Amino acid sequence: MALRGHRYKPLSRNAVTLNPYMAAPFMIARSLRKPRVHQLLQRLHSLSEAQESSFSQRLFYISRLARFLLFRETWSPAADEHMKDKFVALEADKCQFIYLLARSLGARNVIEAGTSFGVSTIYLALAVGQNVAQAKNSPGATAFAGKVIATEKEHSKAVRAREHWKEAGDEVEPCIELREGDLLETLKIEEGMPQEIDLLLLDIWTPLALPTLKIVQPRLKRGALVIADNVSMAKVLYKEFLEYIRNPENGFRTLTIPFSGGLEVSVYLPEE
């Protein structure tokens, strides 16, 4: 993920089976042309879940939270090194929920702040690709385009993400533009940046959530969605972001969805 873009994951796992919002497992398979994408997602989620449920990873999250509460230490080089080979992917139920939101919104231009190994990016790219195809087939349609702008700081993770997207194939890979480096700089690059953004997914190191939102906000389309993960479990770390996005004067209407760790879903509705 971008710029030490590691997030604190919930200590309670098995969200896929416990979450009341979970639909049939991997319902996204019904919308795929090729089964290999479904199989790839199953494999990647299984690997991520195995990492997250390990004793060492749970201990790591507890120690990080303790160091923040005791010393206000948000991150460290040692923590950065520890997370280099970790998926820290969004759980499958959250990914499917976000996919459905993107489809219902008709989102064609999406920013993912924090890509890691590119698992949630696959869902976003599927939604964008299907939305673009649907728009092109609409009566009186003109030229339509769309893409997911993904961000990642760690080169090794960017390499793995690209490998996964290539494996997913033409339903996914052509819809993604990966901006590697500090997302507070790469998201300011005008070239290739859509004028309007339909959806922003914030799945990054918590102190970066608000600065990232403020960079993207001028491009948010009216009715655009902003989604942030683990806002309940990491509420103290998201303090400034939550104060901002829950203040109606900033143009957002927001709700915390009770997925594991809490998922903040906000609609951008600025006063006209």
Image (tube, rainbow, N blue to C red):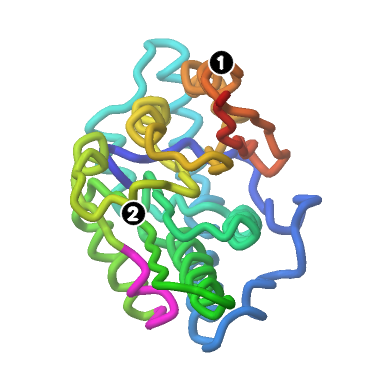
Dot 2, how many residues are within 10 Å of its Cα: few (below 14), some (14-19), or many (20+)?
many
Element on which disc 2 rests: strand
Front: mark 1 or 2: 1
Instruction: Look at the image and give the residue range highlighted in magenta.
Output: 168-176
The residue located at (35%, 26%) in the rendering is 211
Asked whether 141 or 46 is in front, the reply is 141
Q: Is residue 176 left or right of residue 78?
A: right
Q: Residue furthest right?
A: 20
Residue 178 visible in the shown view:
yes
Q: Is residue 175 magenta?
A: yes
Q: What type is the residue that disc 2 sits on?
A: Ala
Q: Disc 1 and disc 2: Cα gap in Å?
A: 29 Å
Residue at 52%, 88% in the rendered image: 34
Q: Residue lying at the far bottom in this picture: please name it.
A: 34
Asked whether 77 or 228 is in front, the reply is: 228
Nearer to the camera, 214 or 25: 214
Q: Which residue is mark 1?
A: 249
The type of residue carrying mark 1 is Glu
Disc 1, SS: helix
Residue linked to disc 2: 150
Which residue: 31% across, 35% down? 79
160 in magenta: no
